[in-house]
C-alpha cells in the first residue's frame, strides 16, 4: 500500500490528539464532498487515521469527488480498505443511494481564484445546487451537516472593525468576477439556515479564512505557493502588488480540528469563524519564507506586473476574524505562522528532492 505523506501524517497525529468528542463519530457513516481537494482530503485522512488509532472506531468513510484520476491518486494509501469508499460523482447531481449517512461535510468547491475565476458557473453551482442536494440527503437520512463557507461572504469591510464577527457584513458586487465564489457561499449559507428553521435540520456553517499546509500543489495559484515555487526554483520572490496587503493564515491542522468541533458541537443554522487572528502582510510573508529557505542571495521584488487574477484583485484585508464564537466551543489556533510555514517549506523541499531522485 502507498504510504501517506509523512508531513500530513504528523498533522493527523496532532489533530486526533485534541480533546474533541471523537467517539461521537465511532460506528457512523460520514460523507465528505470535495474529497480530492486540500481540505476535503485532510478530513478524509483524519477519519481514516482515527480508525487506525482506535480499532473499535469503525467509521465508514464516503469520499465524494468528480475526478476518478485525482481521487485514485489522492487516496492511493487507502485503496482496498474496508472503511473507505470512493464515490465518483459531481456534487451538483442528486445523491442517489440507500446507504445510511450520519454526518455530511460539504467541502466541494474551487477555493483558489486561479480556479474559480476560470469556472464561475461550476463554482456557484457547487455551493448553491450542491448544497441543496446535500441538505435534501440530510433530510432523508437524518444526518447532521456542516457547510464549509468562507470569509468572502463578508464582502468589503465597510464597517471599519479590526475584528470581523459573524454579523459584520459589508458590500459584495454580484457582477464582480470573484462573486461566483462569495455569492455561492452566501446562498449555501442561506439554504443551511433555511433548512434548519423550516425542517429542523442540524446544519452548521464554518467560515474559513486563508488556510495553508501540506497537500497543495506548487502551481495552486495561492500567494504562498507562488513564493515557495520561486525559492525552490532559485528565483527572486515576485510580489505583484506593493506587498502591504495582509491575510490571516490558518494552518490546516488547526482548521480541521475546528471543523470537526463545529460538526459535533455547533448549533444548527449558526455560522462560526474559523481562522487565525494574526495577520501577515505579503511582504512579511515573503521575508519569512526567504528566511526559512536560507537563500539570502535571493531578493523580494515588488509590483512585478499583473495576471488574469490580479486584473480582478481581492480587496485588501481590513480586519481579521473575531473567533469568540468558536472559542466558546473550545477551539483556538495553535500553530504559529513561523512554524507552520517552516513545515510547509520543508514539505515542498522534500517533494522536490524525491522527484529529482
Image (cartoon, helix red, strand yellow):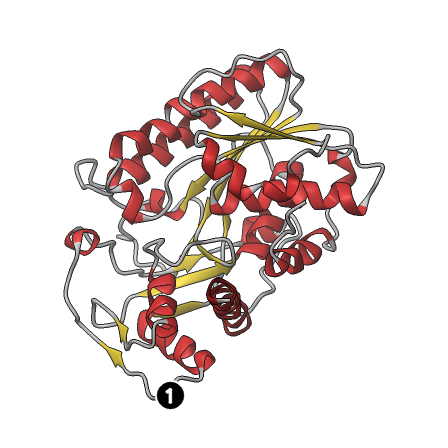
Looking at the picture, tell me which residue is in the foreground, 63 or 137.
63
Residue 230 spot, x, y in % from top left: 32, 70
* Mark 1 neighbour class, 10 Å CA radius: few under 14, some 14 to 19, many 20 or more: few
Left-right relation of 102 to 97: right
Q: Is residue 308 above or below residue 318?
A: above
- Could you tell me which secondary element the residue under label 1 belongs to? loop
Q: Is residue 251 above or below residue 193?
A: below
Q: Residue at x 52, y 72 (%)?
A: 342
Residue 146 spot, x, y in % from top left: 55, 34
Q: Is residue 288 above or below residue 209?
A: below
Left-right relation of 183 to 304: right
Looking at the picture, tell me which residue is in the foreground, 127 or 331.
127
Q: Residue at x 65, y 40 (%)?
A: 78
Q: Kindly identify which residue carries mark 1.
A: 296
Quadrant placement of the N terminus: top right
Q: Residue at x 68, y 58 (%)?
A: 14
Residue 267, picture quadrant: top right
Amino acid at each position: 500500500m502507498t504510504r501517506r505523506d509523512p508531513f500530513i501524517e504528523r498533522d493527523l497525529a496532532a489533530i486526533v490528539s485534541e480533546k474533541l468528542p471523537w467517539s461521537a463519530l465511532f460506528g457512523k457513516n460520514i460523507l465528505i464532498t470535495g474529497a480530492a481537494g486540500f481540505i476535503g482530503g485532510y478530513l478524509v485522512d483524519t477519519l481514516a487515521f482515527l480508525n487506525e488509532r482506535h480499532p473499535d472506531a469503525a467509521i465508514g468513510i464516503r469520499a465524494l469527488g468528480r475526478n476518478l484520476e485525482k481521487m485514485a491518486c489522492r487516496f492511493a494509501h487507502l485503496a482496498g480498505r474496508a472503511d473507505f469508499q470512493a464515490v465518483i460523482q459531481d456534487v451538483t447531481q442528486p445523491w442517489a443511494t440507500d446507504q445510511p449517512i450520519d454526518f455530511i461535510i460539504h467541502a466541494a468547491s474551487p477555493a483558489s481564484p486561479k480556479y474559480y475565476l476560470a469556472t464561475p458557473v461550476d463554482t456557484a453551482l457547487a455551493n448553491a445546487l450542491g448544497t441543496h442536494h446535500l441538505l435534501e440527503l440530510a433530510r432523508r437520512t437524518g444526518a447532521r451537516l456542516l457547510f464549509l463557507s468562507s470569509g468572502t461572504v463578508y464582502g468589503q469591510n465597510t464597517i471599519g472593525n479590526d475584528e470581523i464577527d459573524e454579523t459584520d457584513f459589508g458590500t459584495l458586487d454580484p457582477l464582480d468576477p470573484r462573486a461566483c465564489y462569495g455569492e455561492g457561499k452566501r446562498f449555501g449559507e442561506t439554504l443551511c439556515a433555511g433548512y434548519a428553521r423550516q425542517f429542523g435540520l442540524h446544519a452548521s456553517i464554518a467560515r474559513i479564512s486563508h488556510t495553508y499546509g501540506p497537500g497543495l500543489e506548487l502551481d495552486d495559484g495561492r500567494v504562498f505557493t507562488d513564493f515557495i515555487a520561486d525559492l525552490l526554483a532559485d528565483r527572486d520572490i515576485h510580489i505583484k502588488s506593493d506587498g502591504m496587503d495582509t491575510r490571516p493564515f490558518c494552518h490546516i491542522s488547526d482548521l480541521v480540528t475546528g471543523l470537526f468541533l463545529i460538526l459535533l458541537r455547533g448549533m444548527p443554522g449558526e455560522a462560526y469563524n474559523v481562522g487565525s487572528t494574526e495577520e501577515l502582510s505579503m511582504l512579511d510573508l515573503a521575508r519569512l519564507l526567504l528566511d526559512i529557505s536560507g537563500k539570502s542571495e535571493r531578493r523580494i521584488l515588488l509590483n512585478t506586473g499583473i495576471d488574469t487574477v490580479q486584473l480582478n484583485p481581492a480587496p485588501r484585508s481590513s480586519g481579521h476574524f473575531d473567533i469568540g464564537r468558536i472559542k466558546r466551543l473550545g477551539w483556538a489556533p495553535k500553530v504559529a505562522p513561523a512554524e507552520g510555514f517552516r513545515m510547509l517549506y520543508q514539505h515542498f523541499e522534500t517533494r522536490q528532492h524525491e522527484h529529482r531522485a
